[in-house]
Amino acid sequence: MFTLTRSQYNTKRTVKSAVSVSTVMAGLWSCFAVGVTLLLAHNVFGTDAEQNENRFRDPSMVQDKSHLKEHVQELTQEQINQMSPEELEFHFFKSHDTDKNLKLDGLEIMAAIDHQHSHRQPAEQPAPEHETPEQTRARRYREHQERLNFLTGMVDKILEQDDTDDDGMMSYIEYVISRRRHEKDVQASQQQRQKDLNTQLNQ
């Protein structure tokens, strides 16, 4: 974990007390670094609405064939391509159930989400030319905390919505029920939108 040493704190106090051009430039650089970090976090983790979604209800995640192939080496790509959506979802769940108890705990859920998001994360860019080692450590610490907060928040939301027996884990039955309920909700929403559109067209 990133921490500042006593000497670094003393240095910060000394720099803070010196009104100079270098102090102003350091402040401007810090603002720029924070802005870049927030922009990168938005691109990696998505909008606030996307972060609030239950990723375990998202077909693009639980039916991801390339993701599944990375976890289930004994299956060929042809076998995976021929699977039904229900079969893909079963193997997705099974591949992340590392202790084979037919339940996913918080760490197993977090690993599944983190693996999927790691593919979306852009490659780490080299540090800006004028970034000091201390600024680099601070930036990386902020990025780490933002990622950790995103993942823990997502796990909490999934368990809050789908852990119906409140045992702190999501069973396979809870997972299936959640997926089917979500599919029905999406279908009902689409039908309602179509109904509203037809009403507007007929007016």
Image (cartoon, grey):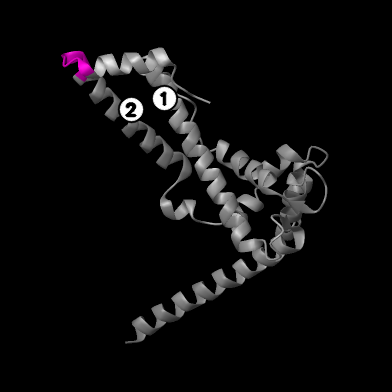
Residue 180: numbered disc: none
138 shown above or below 146? above
Image location (x, y in percent) of residue 43:
42, 40
Q: Which residue is mark 2?
A: 33
Seen at 49% across and 55% down, the residue is 52
Q: Residue at x 78, y 41 (%)?
A: 72
Residue found 35% across the figure and 81% down from its top? 201
In contact (CB < 8 Å): disc 2 and disc 1: yes
Residue 99, quarter of the rendered image: top right
Q: Position of residue 157 (x, y in %)?
A: 56, 56
Give the magenta range: 17-23
Instruction: Sort mark 1 into few (<14), some (14-19) or many (20+) by Cα contacts within 10 Å.
Output: some
In the displayed structure, would residue 132 be above or below residue 82? Answer: above
Up the image or down, 161 lies above or below 134; here it is: below
Apparent side of residue 155 relative to residue 4 in the rendered image (left or right): right
Q: Could you say which is closer to the camera, residue 43 or residue 87? A: 43
Tell me the kind of residue under disc 2: Ala
Q: Which residue is mark 1?
A: 138
